Image (spheres, rainbow, N blue to C red):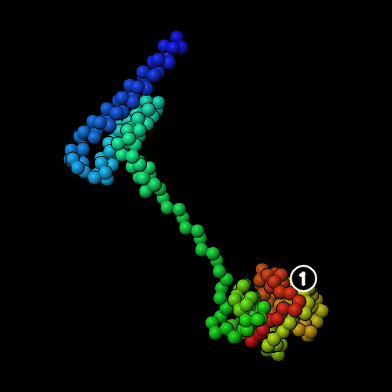
């Protein structure tokens, strides 16, 4: 019984393959005369063979999957024999192009006509109320919005050197007002620190929370800053 079943399956596969080859030959016969006359280029032949291949695949829709799969595979084999590489080339051509990688986000450039010297690690523009960090004259962070000293408490211009850093600082002069992420650049209490950049200060440089933390982490004792 086992040998009989095996023989029956083998005959069925041969029958299906023969049917696919017959369908391919019939399809080629109906279209080849007009689409690919004698002496046609390989490109023309490939076009006709691919058309016959597609007709067979479309014609097997609705058939039981085992039969449909066998016919379609036989059609693929016949196409690869008659038009080598045509199926693979079409698949590559129809494959969507990979998405380009998103461009790397670059830090914002320093203001135009920037008078901040290249050897300054940090820069502050009193006129624009902005501050940024740089290395070798190239901006590494910012510019970001800041607020500086109000009238009578002006932030001192010129060169300064970072003298100390206190993460959880308070101002004893102004009623223990919080000054998180303080980075001092004078011996008179002037510092970068977290504060409202929309409210003028008593001489310090207010930065919003994330910017204050970044300045605190980036600047070190001995770094030079320039305020103009």
Residue at the image position 66 percent from the left and 85 percent from the top: 227
Describe residue 93's horizontal placement relative to residue 152 as left or right. left
Kind of element beneath mark 1: strand
Residue 178, picture quadrant: bottom right
Answer yes or no: is residue 57 visible: no
Closer to the camera in the image, 177 or 124 = 124
Describe residue 183's horizontal placement relative to residue 127 as left or right. right
Residue 66, picture quadrant: top left
Circle 1 residue = 167
In the figure, 187 relative to 86: above or below? Answer: below
Residue at the image position 67 percent from the left and 78 percent from the top: 121
Image coordinates for residue 185, horizontal then vertical, percent:
74, 81
Image coordinates for residue 176, horizontal then vertical, percent:
80, 76
Residue at the image position 57 percent from the left and 78 percent from the top: 110
In the figure, 86 relative to 165: above or below? Answer: above
Image coordinates for residue 24, horizontal then vertical, percent:
27, 32
Image coordinates for residue 153, horizontal then vertical, percent:
71, 87
Quadrant placement of the N terminus: top left
Residue at the image position 19 percent from the left and 42 percent from the top: 39
Describe residue 159's horizontal placement relative to residue 73 as left or right. right
Task: Kindly give the residue lying farthest to the front in the view shown.
Answer: 39
Q: Residues within 10 Å of mark 1 (few under 14, many from 20)?
A: some
């Amino acid at each position: 019984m086992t040998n009989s079943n095996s023989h029956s399956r083998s005959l069925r596969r041969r029958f299906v393959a023969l049917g696919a080859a017959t369908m391919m030959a019939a399809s080629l016969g109906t279209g080849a005369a007009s689409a690919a006359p004698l002496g046609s280029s390989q490109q023309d032949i490939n076009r006709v063979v691919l058309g016959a291949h597609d007709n067979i695949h479309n014609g097997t829709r609705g058939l039981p999957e085992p039969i449909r799969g066998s016919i379609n595979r036989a059609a693929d084999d016949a196409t690869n024999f008659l038009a080598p590489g045509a199926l693979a080339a079409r698949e590559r051509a129809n494959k969507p192009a990979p998405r380009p990688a998103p461009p790397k986000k670059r830090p914002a450039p320093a203001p135009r006509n920037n008078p901040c010297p290249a050897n300054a690690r940090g820069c502050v523009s009193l006129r624009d109320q902005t501050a940024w960090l740089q290395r070798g004259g190239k901006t590494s962070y910012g510019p970001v919005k800041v607020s500086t000293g109000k009238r009578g408490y002006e932030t001192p211009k010129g060169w300064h050197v970072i003298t100390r850093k206190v993460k959880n600082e308070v101002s004893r002069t102004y009623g223990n007002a919080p000054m998180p992420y303080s980075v001092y650049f004078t011996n008179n209490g002037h510092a970068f620190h977290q504060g409202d950049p929309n409210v003028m200060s008593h001489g310090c440089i207010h930065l919003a929370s994330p910017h204050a933390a970044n300045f605190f982490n980036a600047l070190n004792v001995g770094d030079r800053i320039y305020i103009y």
